[in-house]
Image (cartoon, helix red, strand yellow):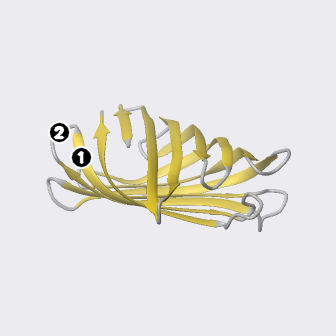
Amino acid sequence: SAGAVRRSDNDRITVSMDYARGRQEVGGVKATTEDWWRGRGKYDYYVSPKLYVYGDGRYEKDAVALLDRRVLVGAGAGYQWVETDITKFRTEIGLASLYEKFDNAGGSNSEVSLQAGYNFEHRLTDTLLFVNDLAYYPSLDKFSDYYLTTTAELRASITPRIFGNIKVIFNYDKSPAPDQGSTDVKYILGLGMSF
């Protein structure tokens, strides 16, 4: 995991990336159990101390789930309900273009969707931070077809820039790759870096 945030009086830039690869051997047979990565970039411009407009993009790839790529590009508005050294909480709503291509399916899926979500951070101690976010993308053509991703993380500072973390990532895709499940849950014990 790696992430960076730059916050000024008028704007905020956020970039983050996660990567995981895992293999296991059972009865002499080796298998890849995790092989995925995702990246995100976001720009928020504050039109008032609490209200902002944003543009963001996500890119995801998951070889085990047969996801060749998922690309999300969106824009909208958000509201910063709380922003202190202890707690930060904001909500957002907008529109996004969602593109998916799977390894075991011909063609691809491209649609315009609503984009709604939140981000919550709370400092439990000087060295322990809880982070939770959620993004929900229901299709405008068929509201019951949606993609949802949420992350819950407990982050412990090791140095000012390096942290250890326990993270759970839950993804739900109503229209997954053929012969794949809609739900994907990842449990991560890792090291991260913040800039």
**What is the secondary structure assignment of the residue under circle 1?**
strand
- 149 vs 39: above or below: below
List the residue tagged with mark 1: 163
Q: Residue at x 37, y 39 (%)?
A: 2
Dot 2 amino acid type? Pro
In-image side of 95 versus 186 (left or right): right
Circle 2 crowding by C-alpha within 10 Å: few under 14, some 14–19, many from 20: few
List the residue tagged with mark 2: 160
Place residue 25 in its image quadrant: bottom left
From the viewer's side, name the closer residue of 181 and 81: 181
Total numbered labels placed on residues in the image: 2
Q: Residue at x 66, y 41 (%)?
A: 71
| Residue 151 at x, y percent in the picture | 45, 59
| Residue 79 at x, y percent in the picture | 49, 51
- 65 vs 39: above or below: below
| Residue 43 at x, y percent in the picture | 51, 34
Dot 1 amino acid type? Phe
| Residue 84 at x, y percent in the picture | 27, 51
